[in-house]
Amino acid sequence: MRFLDDPPRYLFFTGKGGVGKTSIACATAVQLADAGRRVLLVSTDPASNVGQVFGLAIGNRVTAVPDVPNLSALEIDPEAAAQGYRDRIVGPVRGVLPDDVVRGIEEQLSGACTTEIAAFDEFTGLLIDTGIAAGYEHIVFDTAPTGHTIRLLQLPGAWSGFLEAGKGDASCLGPLAGLEKQRAQYKAAVDALADGRRTRMVLVTRAQHSTLAEVARTLEELTAVGITRHHLVVNGVFPPEAAGDDALAASIVRREQAALQAMPETLRALPQDVIALKPFNLVGLQTLRHLLTDDVPTPETVPVSEPVIGAEPLSALVDAIAADGHGLVMLMGKGGVGKTTIAAAVAVALARRGASVHLTTSDPAAHLSETLPDEVEHLRVSRIDPHAETARYREHVLDTKGCDLDAAGRAMLEEDLRSPCTEEIAVFQAFSRIIREARHSFVVMDTAPTGHTLLLLDATGAYHRDVARQTGTSGMHVTTPMMRLQDPAQTKMLIVTLAETTPVLEAAGLQADLRRAGIEPWAWVVNQSLTVTPTTSALLQQRAANERPQIHDVLTRHARRCAVVALQPREPIGAERLAALAEDAVERRGLPSAHTA
């Protein structure tokens, strides 16, 4: 693999959710360690699954990986990092300052902004030659999906500039209390990221038009923040020679080869590697050691198993949603499982039933316009754009709170509003506005990948607790966004997954997190399934056989109701294909009808 030629100290793996970043990062770390290098594998994804790949608990501590000498792993846990950050700031003043003052400081440190800063603090600590990083020759970063990663990589420069200019005095006072001490660390992090001799960014993609377009945008954004040494890895490409006479396999090959031929020129100029689609799930050391090699045995033809019992078509879920007449439908899950596609298909199907529908996304890296480029009657499409929402919020604050300030006061307010934490407030407010629309029409929301969405829900919960505390003794009744999310009569939460080990485990973890927040998922959607798709390809049949235990697990252990959506011969782009997806107008195998499920 060319991306492993003369590897620098820092290797970052990034890209759109679901392209295989974690598997490739883990396989890379194992290969370097097997070669005798001292390696630390770090996940910066709030919804990390590195531990699942290796089959061990890692968490927010350096953990040796059994059976791989020289390899250790660390998952930056945002919540654990935030608690440690709070303890470092509040601990020295507890018992010194009055209790009400300490409680005020703790409240300032309770939001998602503190969580982001704390995780960022740990991240930058790994880009300097002291502390945890000192004992390793290579540090391999498995990053969050694109939008969140770009945000993380921008933060060292953003916070350094903010501290240089002066931090203001309001919205981030609590979280920023510990930042001044880290100024030198942030500068060192900026220098390391910009140094091509020390840092290499591996852009992982699939052979899909939308994913290649996304990684091309990522390349532009990374170059803009000073990261200039890049490699491209196209993962999971179906070997043309393995297609045989199978129509589905042949359509996959045609689709992938057409996407690669149309690859943006900026990507074509990069050093490239191609990793073939493997017949096995990428969990465990044995499979990881085969991922970056070509010595994979040809799969044997697997006989068709018994039908999947207990699942239902996506159209049955749409019928149940439509019966309510209005409400919020939120699609959540791991990156790359097809949330955007399923959200768009549900929205188109509702609109074709005559309902008024607003389809929106909170994913910084989502591009609904590519999935649904045409107009549909009764359907409006939007996106929560963090930059636009932040600009709108700043303008509103200056027009209201700043209208009566003198020049010095307005300058201080403007400085405070330049804090990166302002974006959190602005996005939360936009999220809350959209939730309110669901009282009178349908709102279908395509959310960011799991970790980023949970941070948004954390902000929603913090706001709910603050409102409840302020109104608790006043007798007022206020309906907060969190209350709407918790009310099954107003919100239907759909968890989207793939029939693979890691996505199902992560979806189950997401469901547990939602339940702890008082939100009960309404249904699961197993997307892009081969189990319900007729195929004679040995490779696809082997992968279909691997799916069955995962679907059975979803049906028997996790989901109250579950739809299984077949892998499509053509990408479900445009209103007609999305409508066909929602109405199950593709040949299926082994599923009972909605009436017999």
Image (spheres, grey):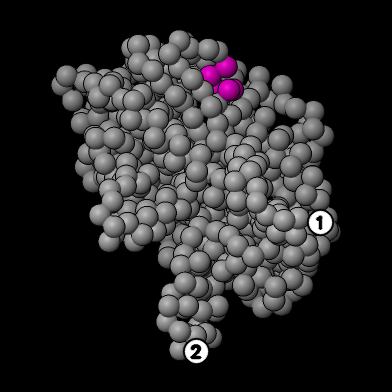
Foreground label between 1 and 2? 2
Q: Give the tally of numbered discs.
A: 2
| Magenta stretch secondary structure, dominant | helix
Percent from the top left, x then y, of residue 355? 35, 16
Measure how far apart labels 1 and 2 are at the Cα level: 43 Å
Mark 2 belongs to which amino acid? Answer: Val
The quarter in which the C terminus is drawn is top left
Q: Secondary structure at mark 2?
A: loop
Q: Nearer the viewer, residue 541 or 447?
A: 447
Mark 1 belongs to which amino acid? Answer: Ala
Percent from the top left, x then y, of residue 176? 62, 68
Dot 1 alpha-carbon crowd within 10 angstroms: few under 14, some 14 to 19, many 20 or more:
some
> Magenta span has 496?
no
Q: Which residue is mark 1?
A: 194
Percent from the top left, x then y, of residue 486? 29, 45
Residue at 42% across, 82% down: 99
* Magenta residues (range): 369-373
The answer to whether one can see residue 247 in this image is no
**For this view, does 409 lie left or right of residue 95?**
right
Q: Which residue is mark 2?
A: 96
